[in-house]
Image (cartoon, rainbow, N blue to C red):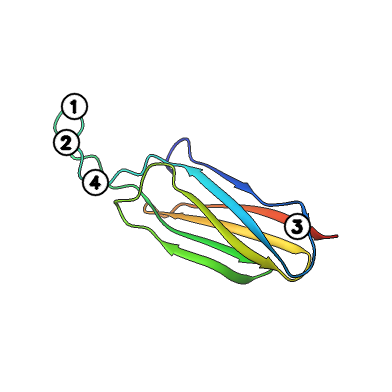
Amino acid sequence: MASGVKPRVKVPKSASAGDIITIKTLISHKMESGQRKDGDGNIIPRSIINRFTADFNGQNVIDVAMEPAISTNPYFQFDATVPEAGEFTFTWYDDDGDVYETKKSIKIG
């Protein structure tokens, strides 16, 4: 598991049914491309978040494939329509097989 990896997500606490909301996500991750060398001249192994998904009540909202050129601490902002109260599940997939997940609920009010 990569050290210091921390996902952060901002989702409004409530919305009206049918509203379009803005969601912001950021994950702290070094994102090594596998092309740099350490002080001894050894290649630093590739370690990137290679996929990000967001689901709402089990339905996919966004699915992003990432490549080595992506920056450190990838940030995504996107809009989603909220048809009902429910829960968003955000998942980041790491090259080493680790999966980082966080959930946020939203109420209809």
Pick out the residue farthest to the top: 39
Mark 1 secondary-structure assignment: loop
Amino acid of disc 4: Gly
Q: Nearer the viewer, residue 94 or 25?
A: 25
Amino acid of disc 1: Gly
What numbered label is drawn on residue 42? 2
> Which quadrant does the C terminus fall into?
bottom right
Q: Nearer the viewer, residue 61 or 77?
A: 77
What numbered label is drawn on residue 95? none
Mark 3 secondary-structure assignment: strand
Q: Position of residue 80 (x, y in %)?
A: 63, 64
Q: CA distance from mark 4 to mark 3?
A: 39 Å
Dot 1 corresponds to which residue? 39
Q: Tell me where residue 21 sits by quadrant.
A: bottom right
Amino acid of disc 2: Asn
Q: Position of residue 78 (x, y in %)?
A: 55, 58
Please give the name of the residue rendered at 36% of the width and 49% of the height, measured from the top-left corner: 48
4 or 2: mark nearer the eye: 4
Please give the name of the residue rendered at 76% of the width and 51% of the height, measured from the top-left corner: 13
Q: CA distance from mark 4 to mark 2?
A: 10 Å
Dot 3 corresponds to which residue? 106
Please give the name of the residue rendered at 58% of the width and 57% of the height, measured from the top-left corner: 90
> Considering only order in the chain, which callout, 3 or 2, is on the residue closer to the N terminus?
2
Mark 3 residue crowding within 10 angstroms, few (<14) / some (14–19) / many (20+) = some
Pick out the residue farthest to the right: 109
Mark 2 residue crowding within 10 angstroms, few (<14) / some (14–19) / many (20+) = few
> Considering only order in the chain, which callout, 3 or 4, is on the residue closer to the N terminus?
4
What numbered label is drawn on residue 34? 4
4 or 3: mark nearer the eye: 3
Amino acid of disc 3: Ile
Q: CA distance from mark 1 to mark 4?
A: 15 Å
